[in-house]
Amino acid sequence: MAQKPLAGIVVLDLTRYLAGPYCTLLLAGLGAEVIKIEPPGKGDLHRRFPPFIGPKGASGKPQTDEDMGVFMLHRARNKKSVTLDLYQPEGRAVFKELCRKADVVVENYSPGVMDEMESGYAELRKLNPGLILCSISGFGQTGPLRDWRAYDPVIQSMSGLASVTGYPDRPPTRCGAAISDTVAPLFAIIGILSALRRREQGGTGEWVDIAMMDTSFFLQPDLLELLNGGITPERRGNTHVAGTPLNTYPTRDGFVTIAVTTDKNWECLLTALGREDLKTDARFTTPLSRRQHIQFIDTMVAAWIQERVTNEVVPFLQRNEVPAGAVQTLPELLTHPQVQARQMIVDLSHPTAGVLPGAKGFGMPIRFVENPLQFDQPAPLLGAHNEEIYAHRLGISASHLAELRAKGVI
C-alpha cells in the first residue's frame, strides 16, 4: 500500500467535543500521527457518553471496563492516546517536550486557556520555531467577542445562518446538521496544510486562528447581495432566488427537490412535464421573468409531481436532465446504493474486541483515485500509547513514568 500523504507529520491533539476532533480525525485518516492527549483517569468525555460499544456488544451503559462511547470510537480512529494532566507543572513540562518533537498542535479550548497553561503560541514557538498551532474557537482569538462561549446553535444564530433558514412567517431555524461545528474543522485543515507547505518552502511555524463564526459567515454568498446591492436575504423556505422552480414538492409517498437555475434546465423540465408550449411563452423566457411567475410554476410542478411516487419522479426527471433528488430520511440514506458504493458507511472496530455486529461509522470523505485510503485503525483505549510515546519517543525512564503515574500526572 502506498504511503499516506501526511505520513511523518506529528500532531498533538488537545481537542474535545466536535469541531476539533473532526479536524484531527481527518488529519489522522490522511496519515498524520495524531497523539490524543487526555486527562488521566477519565479521558475524553465522549469515552463516557452513550451508547457504548465493547467486547459484549452495544448497550446504553458500560458492560466492561473496555467499553467505549460510540462517538469516541468514531472520532478517535487512527489516533494514539496518551494521558497527561496539563494543569500540573510536571504535566506541562512533558507536554512541552512533546511539542519539541511535533509538527502541529490542534486545540479548541477557550481563548487564553493555552496561555494559562504556559503553552501559548509565543511559548511554544520558543521551544520549536517550526511548530504550527491551530486554535479553533467560537469567535476567534481577537475581537470583542473573543471570550464568549459558543456551541453550534449559537454560531448558526450569530453568523446569520439561522436568519435565512426556515419560512418567512415562522421563527428563524437552525440547520438540522451541526453545520458550524463541521465546517470549521475543514477550514482548520486547509490552514494547517497551508502552514506546513509554507514551512517546507523555508518558512517557520504559524498560528492558525479558526473562528466558527468566521467560517459560517463565509458560507453565505447571499450576503454579497446585501454588501453590494442593499438587498437583505430573507427566509424563503425551500425556494431561492437562484432559480425557479427551486423548491421541494410532495409526491404520493415522500418529497422531491427540483433545482432549475438555467434556461437549459427550464427547457428540460418543460419537456419532462409535457409542457413544450411554454418554451416560447414570454412570461418564462428569462430567470427573472420566471421568478415573477413563481406561483404559477410551483403550482404546475406540484400538480404533476403529487400524482406520482418518488422513485418514479426522480429517475424520470434525471433522464430528462433536470436536477432533482429525493428528500431522503436518515434511515433511507444509510441503505442508499450511492452511499454504499462510495464506502461512506464502514465497520467500526473496537481496540480489543475488533469488528462488532452493528457498529458502523462514516467512511473517509476525501478520495484518492490512484492511492485510495480509509480509516484503518480503531480508536485507542485510554492511555494505550503512554509507554510508546513517553518512554520510546521522549526517553522517560520506567521509574520516572511510575513516579508520574503515582502523582496522577499520567
Image (spheres, helix red, strand yellow):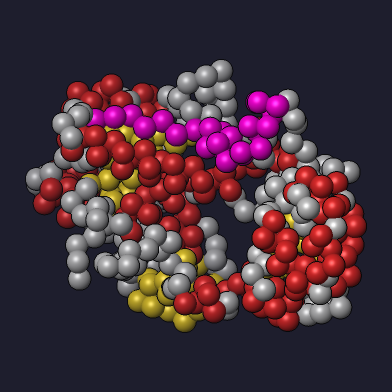
Give whichever of 268, 221 is nearer the camera. Answer: 268
Q: Is residue 327 left or right of residue 408?
A: right
Verify whether residue 220 appears in magenta: yes
Question: Tag count in the figure?
Answer: 0
Query: Is residue 260 in the magenta section?
Result: no
Q: Looking at the picture, does residue 122 appear above or below residue 15?
A: above
Give me the residue at 59% from left, 50% from top.
178
Instruction: Name the side, left or right, on which 357 lies relative to 82.
Output: right
Q: Quadrant of the N terminus?
A: bottom left
| Span colored in magenta | 205-229
Q: Position of residue 335 (x, y in %)?
A: 57, 78
In the rendered image, which quarter is residue 230 located in?
A: top right
Residues 19 and 251: in front is 251
Q: Is residue 11 visible?
A: yes
310 to 376, vertically: above or below = below
Residue in the picture at 75% in, 31% down: 232
Residue 390 vertical position relative to residue 69 in the rendered view, above or below: above
Q: Nearer the viewer, residue 331 or 40?
A: 331
- Residue 367, image x and y in percent? 37, 63
Residue 302 visible at all: no
Question: In this orientation, which residue lies closer to the viewer: 57 or 251?
Answer: 251
User: Which residue is situated farthest in the top direction here?
Assistant: 144
